[in-house]
Image: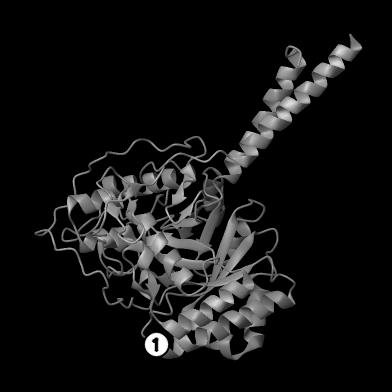
Amino acid sequence: MGPFTCSSTVVIFLLLSFLLSFYSADSQSFIGVNYGQVADNLPPPEATAKLLKSTSIQKVRLYGADPAIIKALANTGIGIVIGAANGDIPALASDPNFAGNWVNSNVLPFYPASKIIVVTVGNEVVTAPDPNLVAQLLPAMQNVQNALNAASLGGKIKVSTVHSMAVLSQSEPPSAGAFGFGDTMKALLQFHSANGAPFMINPYPFFAYQSDPRPETLAFCLFQPNAGRPDANTGIKYMNMFDAQVDAVHSALKGMGFKDVEIVVAETGWPYKGDPNEVGPSLESAKAYNANLINHLRSMVGTPLMPGKSVDTYIFALYDENQKPGPASERSFGLFKPDLSVTYEAGLSKSAQTPAPTPTTPAPATTPTPATPAPVNPAPATPTTPVNPAPTTPTTPVNPAPTFSGIPGVATSHRRPLSPLLILAIILAFTLVEVLDHSNQFRS
């Protein structure tokens, strides 16, 4: 190959710039946010849409199907998850026409300009105290699926439901993750598998720390330097709680024969303030958790049992919801304030692809005498069924911090895999240079 010409250099620069910018935008597609509306001070939907476009957030989960928000997100390219409320499940299950009307009212007027990607039917229904609602969940999901199929959208918009971590009867070590609610979960997973629908789960390391408020547990939950926790079955040393919780779900899926069902993290987050007697909430810890989570997702390292990819993750939450009941922490998960300013920098702006460094050892919240780690297999807690479209974050720790006692493990790698798109860009660039150089030589 002859020496690079000026035109060759320009071609390389333009081609690589285009492909790398495309890769950068696409690589953020796994970062989403929850947009709850139990508040009386939220900014207009149009302002929120403009805010989201200024960030690397590519997906938004709604707890209902507010038409003003869905319209505001039209032509933004942002993926939208809309939801049918728990209260709609009986009608959706018993009346296919109701399901058809629901789709006709909440999907068809907006799609495809508004990029609706998932319809969730209910929230944390399986662990709800109403067995009748649990029995109606799958028929409701099937009727919504049938309505989407009838509108020729069955392959484009998925139907799912959202679960708390309490659907697991065992969550530690991660390789031993297993579901409770056997027949119910098996039937739901058969639906997921048949329709290519994601399994949506709400892991909260925050609650794990509340159940075991030791400094080493805080570091493990915040993705900060720690000794790690080995899984005796696999020899893998887990370095953060998020990976451990997600892998426990993966193991549970695999144990039931559905290892290929995609996992989506429907909610995860950390409150930046709480009541004086609450363990865990602080601005420092919220910033550390969300910033380090975003960095972890961007690294594309994945989890030890699902390496090389990042699960779609919806951070809780876009704004505080000042009308939610419960302790102060329930109203303090917002990444942004009603005036659209940031609560703290988590690295979500498009100009900040790498979050600012977070303290490696934040002081834990004042706590009672450190508790003994909770049992390996706690009985699943039953979350309170919410009455508002945006459910209250579970207030009971449903996945206590694991001890992972056993043999020493091997720390997971944090090296980012080389992107196939980047490799292709380089090959194309140099191939084009070769062609241009030969052309120049021929003309000379």
Residue 406's spot in the image, x, y percent? 25, 58
Visible residue check, residue 11: yes
Q: Residue tagged by mark 1? A: 130
Residue drawn at (59%, 72%) of the image: 193
Mark 1: which amino acid? Asp
Q: Mark 1 falls on what kind of element?
A: loop
Q: Is residue 116 left or right of residue 287?
A: right
Location of the N terminus by quadrant is top right
Residue 422: image quadrant is top right
**Image: 444 above or below 345:** above
In front of the other: 128 or 261: 261
Residue 336 placement (x, y as % from top left): 41, 49
Camera-side residue: 337 or 286?
286
User: Relative to 347, is 4 on the left or the right?
Assistant: right
* Residue visible at 38% across and 46% down in the picture: 412
- Screen quadrant of the C terminus: top right
**Residue 48 spot, x, y in % from top left:** 52, 52
Q: Residue 71 location, x and y as percent? A: 63, 60
Label 1 Cα crowd, 10 Å radius (few <14 / some 14-19 / many 20+): few
